[in-house]
Image (tube, rainbow, N blue to C red):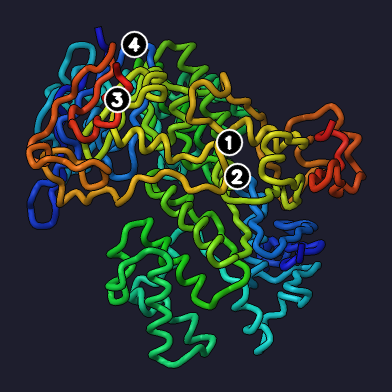
């Protein structure tokens, strides 16, 4: 059984005129226990909003979930009471945010911020909480946790701050960790440290990880499965290796081809995806990649959304004939 | 080949102020003895982690910071004395593209005003000539001519960076300094801008100092690459040589730390322990050996750690703990 099963999730934001702009359009996701799912896409594609919706953390009153269900261990998170979702947050699902300086409170010591998790979610008193905090800080590789616990976020480096955010997310040993661009603000060598730490901790606790990122390199090195999002929809979902070896959707192929690597030819023109990501206000109901695709789309594919089809075991792609056209030979 | 830009023994130090009276209490050695040469038409890539001094170096080359010691020569003429008319004359030969196009363009000016401003400041042409130059620039970077009357917020991130590039090219500079020009851009837009930069470089014969923390992007655009660590250049070589045959331990870890978008390359990336030491209070010996706790670290104390030519064109710091 899947630990997390998202079906038909539809999220909208209200604009100033009172209209709903749909930013996440009927998204399906599933995640098995102990596995890592990468959610990839460019800024504005709806990946962070999807993650926030899972914990019902959308900004109010503008953000709302219109449709869908989020089954967590069989219960729909969208219908449970606010008390219940509060106890699930932190305890069962932990969240790691992108920018550690914004996720931490600058006016409280880091020790107090980690203590808070134990006090709120596990009902410990402050003395017991501190014992756990020091253990947790040690686990995430903070040197001299006893001294560091009394310091403030600004006294730590970016990498250390992100370790604190990880400590907070993992304090109650959640079954699922949602990490929203956890290493984007970090240098490559620090990114490697943080990714390694996360995978070690994940291995120890057997937790699942939903990793949101725009970096396909990070995906290739950490994930078991990948879902590619474009303009609010998942256009392709596959086991990680298959996505890189056998990309089906024109967008996925374009992205993979456009990344400069350490081994490819240099100073040559990179293959590009022409055009820009469409604005939320002028999204069509059919294939949203059509304006950037090199293949002509027939009118019906611009009007009707193609369903995801399974092209091989567990490998799904949006069935727009034009966007999949490049692959018809490759599949046989 | 002609050396167009020559940076010799450049040091840029900033005072760190503290105490009640905000007196200087320490020195931050952001750039600490860097020598680089760039030939005409060449692109030199500069990589390093945040805080290694690469942006300070860039800002000093275009005259936004003053060198503490050392000099920057353009065609044998000293840059850096930017006062008076002489300064202005030289300044227009070296222009800069900034990292974040949203922050480096004046949001209250139209694109036309933004592109015209360098021409106005340097008293180039009359109104008509300037207007046609602006059109030429828009063409060059692939923006519609109608952009002239529009404001930066009306453009996407990639288009804004094109405006930033066009502005830097307005005065026909010989040297273009690019400080992380694609880091703030989205994946599918990044390759478009990289292609534009390649095209401009070839068409205009630009000499570029290209700064980025992303080694894959730097490799793609550069002829040679210099790796900086804590204010010093630790290794320089041609792009291919540096990636295929890195000699300095830091270069090796930097390459190893990049997650490759290919599950078959690298089983797992190599993980480097420790963090970049503070440039305010650097360790006495080799700062990288200190970071990773090299057992030969003590041998580096008191060494000059100058660059040595290891093979033709491949220079590496002569450090007992990092180059073994």
Q: Name the residue at 22% across, 47% down.
A: A291
For the residues labelled 1 and 2, the Cα–Cα distance comes to 7 Å
Question: Are callouts 3 and 2 both on one chain?
Answer: no
Q: Percent x, y for residue B76?
A: 78, 74
Question: Are callouts 4 and 2 both on one chain?
Answer: no
SS type, badge 3: loop
**Residue bearing the label numbered 3:** A89
Label 1, residues with CA under 10 Å away: few <14, some 14-19, many ≥20: many
Question: Are callouts 4 and 3 both on one chain?
Answer: yes
**Residue bearing the label numbered 2:** B219
For the residues labelled 1 and 4, the Cα–Cα distance comes to 34 Å
Mark 1–mark 2 CB contact (< 8 Å): yes
**Residue bearing the label numbered 1:** A262
Which picture quadrant has residue A48? top left
Relative to B233, A48 lies left or right: left
Q: Percent x, y for residue B269?
A: 59, 25
**Mark nearer the viewer, 1 or 4:** 1
**Mark nearer the viewer, 3 or 2:** 2
Q: Name the residue at 46% across, 22% down.
A: A222
Of pointers 1 and 4, the one earlier in the residue sequence: 4
């Amino acid at each position: 059984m899947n630990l997390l099963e998202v079906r038909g999730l539809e999220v909208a934001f209200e604009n100033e005129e009172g209209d709903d702009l749909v930013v996440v359009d009927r998204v399906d996701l599933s995640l098995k226990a102990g596995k890592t799912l990468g959610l990839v896409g460019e800024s504005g594609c709806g990946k962070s909003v999807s993650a926030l919706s899972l914990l019902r953390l959308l900004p109010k009153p503008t953000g709302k979930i219109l449709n869908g269900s989020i089954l967590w261990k069989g219960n729909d998170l969208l219908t449970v009471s606010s008390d219940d979702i509060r106890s699930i947050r932190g305890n069962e699902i932990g969240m790691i945010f992108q920018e550690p300086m914004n996720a931490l409170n600058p006016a409280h010591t880091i020790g107090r911020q980690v203590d808070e998790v134990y006090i709120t979610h596990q009902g410990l008193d402050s003395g017991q909480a501190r014992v756990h905090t020091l253990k947790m800080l040690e686990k995430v590789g903070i040197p001299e946790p006893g001294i560091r616990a009394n310091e403030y976020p600004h006294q730590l480096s970016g990498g250390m701050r992100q370790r604190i955010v990880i400590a907070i997310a993992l304090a109650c040993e959640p079954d699922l960790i949602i990490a929203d661009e956890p290493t984007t603000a970090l240098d490559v060598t620090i990114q490697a440290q943080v990714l390694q730490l996360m995978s070690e901790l994940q291995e120890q606790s057997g937790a699942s990880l939903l990793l949101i990122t725009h970096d396909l390199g990070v995906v290739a090195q950490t994930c078991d499965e990948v879902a590619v999002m474009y303009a609010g929809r998942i256009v392709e979902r596959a086991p990680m290796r298959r996505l890189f070896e056998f990309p089906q959707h024109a967008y996925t192929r374009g992205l993979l081809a456009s990344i400069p690597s350490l081994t490819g030819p240099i100073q040559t023109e990179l293959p590009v995806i022409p055009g820009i990501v469409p604005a939320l206000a002028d999204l069509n109901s059919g294939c949203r990649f059509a304006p950037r695709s090199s293949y002509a789309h027939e009118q019906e594919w611009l009007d009707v959304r193609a369903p995801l089809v399974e092209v091989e075991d567990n490998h799904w792609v949006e069935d727009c004939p034009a966007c999949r056209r490049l692959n018809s030979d490759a599949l046989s | 080949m002609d050396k167009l830009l020559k940076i010799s023994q450049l040091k840029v130090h900033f005072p760190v102020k503290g105490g009640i009276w905000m007196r200087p209490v320490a020195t931050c050695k952001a750039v600490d003895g860097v020598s680089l040469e760039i030939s005409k038409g060449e692109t030199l890539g500069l990589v390093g982690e945040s805080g290694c001094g690469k942006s300070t170096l860039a800002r000093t080359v275009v005259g936004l910071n003053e060198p503490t010691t050392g000099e920057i020569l353009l065609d044998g003429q000293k840059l850096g004395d930017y006062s008076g008319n002489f300064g202005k004359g030289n300044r227009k030969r070296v222009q800069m593209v900034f990292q974040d196009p949203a922050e480096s363009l004046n949001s209250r000016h139209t694109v036309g005003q933004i592109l015209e401003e360098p021409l106005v400041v340097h008293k180039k042409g009359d109104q008509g000539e300037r207007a046609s130059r602006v059109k030429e620039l828009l063409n060059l970077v692939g923006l519609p001519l109608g952009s002239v009357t529009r404001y930066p917020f009306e453009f996407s991130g990639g288009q804004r960076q094109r405006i930033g590039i066009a502005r830097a090219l307005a005065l026909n500079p010989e040297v273009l300094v690019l400080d992380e020009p694609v880091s703030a851009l989205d994946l599918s837009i990044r390759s478009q801008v990289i292609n534009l930069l390649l095209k401009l470089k070839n068409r205009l014969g630009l000499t570029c100092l290209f700064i980025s923390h992303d080694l894959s992007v730097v490799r793609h655009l550069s002829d040679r690459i210099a790796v900086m660590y804590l204010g010093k250049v630790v290794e320089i070589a041609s792009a291919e040589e540096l990636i295929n045959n890195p000699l300095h331990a830091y270069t090796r870890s930097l390459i190893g730390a990049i997650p490759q978008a290919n599950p078959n390359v690298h089983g797992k990336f190599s993980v480097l322990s420790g963090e970049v030491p503070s440039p305010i209070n650097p360790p006495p010996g080799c700062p990288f050996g200190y970071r990773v706790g090299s057992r030969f670290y003590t041998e580096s104390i008191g060494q000059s750690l100058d660059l040595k030519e290891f093979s033709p064109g491949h220079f590496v710091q002569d450090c007992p703990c990092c180059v073994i």
